[in-house]
Amino acid sequence: MGTPEFAVPSLEALVRSGYPPVAIVTGPDRRRGRGRKLQSTPVKQAAHRLNIDALIQPESVKNPEFAAEIHALKCDLQIIVAFRILPHEVFSAARLGAFNLHASLLPRFRGAAPINRALMDGVTQTGVTTFFLKTKVDTGNIILQWPTRVSPDETAGSLHDRLAKLGARAVLETTQRIANGRAKERVQNNSLSSAAPKIFRNDCRVPWNETADCVHNHCRGLSPYPGAWTPWKSGRLKIIGTQIARGTGKPGTVIAVNDHIVVACKIGAIAITKLQAPGQRILETRDFLNGHPIALGTSLREHD
């Protein structure tokens, strides 16, 4: 069970290693993009490439008909990677249970946005966890946990891709352990838990009144999507790439313009290296300035 690109490497790894699913559960086709064309999920597209025809695309996982459909499969194991919150009636249907892949070292960063929130928090290490499902989200017993280091300039996009590959290996290893009766599990320490709630638009606003490290972590944790933003003219300027820079000034004020745009924070400054104007593509700052000159002293905190 999975929907986005993050789940595709896990599906591919299972098929390559002789664990083809009896069925794939993914999200419904949706109209997306400017042309509003009907598009299938990345997992459904991968299923077609892998010649897997048994697809289930529920509008609601709480529908009793969906639970009945899952029970009718009589499957041995449910494997969940970046899917929806499942009711007990669904995840209890498999003979050997159901496990989930989560993109953090649980119990840290439980929730919908573990990759973004980990980087926004400035972690130096994260990883992937597989765990047996329980009714309460992300609290089940841990089966396997693999850590990975995080560099000071890594973005959510690059970490996403790395964890998708690491997670695919973890999913395969977990499947093999369960199939062979070697899956040992341990209870999560709830006293060490932290939350990684879904990212909303207001969560993305750049906190110029924080330190340069905090602002840098905020921006890279939201890069390239959904993108940290700051008020600019009559819209929102998305800041996609940043570096720690030297300089002081009023928080949110442009203090230097060269190949980068240097903006003061509460303590220190950051240099904007990539950005995106409303309705336009992402540009290197040098190219952006050719069409959108920004003067020294410009405030990026005004015009809510």
Image (cartoon, rainbow, N blue to C red):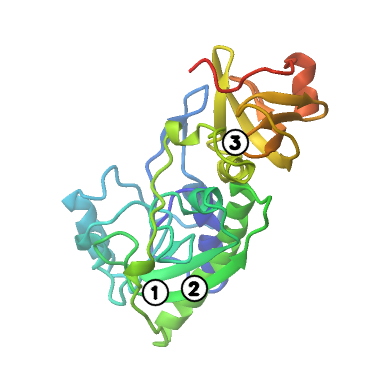
* Crowd tier of the residue under label 2, counting other residues whose Cα lies within 10 Å: few below 14, some 14–19, many 20 or above: some
Q: Residue under circle 2?
A: 145
Q: Tell me the kind of residue under disc 1.
A: Ile
| Number of marks present in the image shown | 3
Categorize mark 1 by other alpha carbons within 10 Å: few (<14), some (14-19), many (20+): many
Relative to 245, residue 128 above or below: below
Q: Confirm whether residue 36 shows in the render.
A: yes
Specify the amino acid type for callout 3.
Lys
Which residue is under mark 3?
Answer: 266
Q: In which quarter of the image is residue 88?
A: bottom left
Circle 3 crowding by C-alpha within 10 Å: few under 14, some 14–19, many from 20:
some
Residue where numbered disc 1 is placed: 142
Sequence order check: which comes first, mark 3 or mark 1? Answer: 1
Instruction: Identify which residue is drawn at 76% across, 38% down.
Output: 246
Judged from the image, the secondary structure of the residue bearing numbered disc 2 is strand
Above or below residue 140? Residue 65 is: above
The relative height of residue 292 versus residue 208 in the rendered view (above or below) is: above
Q: In this view, does 57 lie above or below 194?
A: above
**Of 216 and 291, the residue lying toward us:** 216
CA distance separating discs 2 and 1: 7 Å
Q: In which quarter of the image is the N terminus?
A: bottom left
| 3D distance between C-alphas at marks 3 and 2 | 37 Å
Three-letter code, disc 2: Gln
Q: Residue 300 carries which label?
A: none
Question: Quick one: 185 or 28, which is closer to the camera?
Answer: 185
Side (left or right) of 73 relative to 241: left
User: Residue at coordinates 54% horizontally, 65% vertically from top-left?
Assistant: 127
Q: Position of residue 250 (x, y in %)?
A: 63, 26
Residue drawn at x 51%, y 27% as measured from the top left: 33
Q: Where is residue 236 in the image (x, y as percent from the top left)?
A: 55, 21
Badge 2 vs badge 1, beta-carbon distance below 8 Å: yes
**Are dots 3 and 2 in contact, CB under 8 Å?**
no
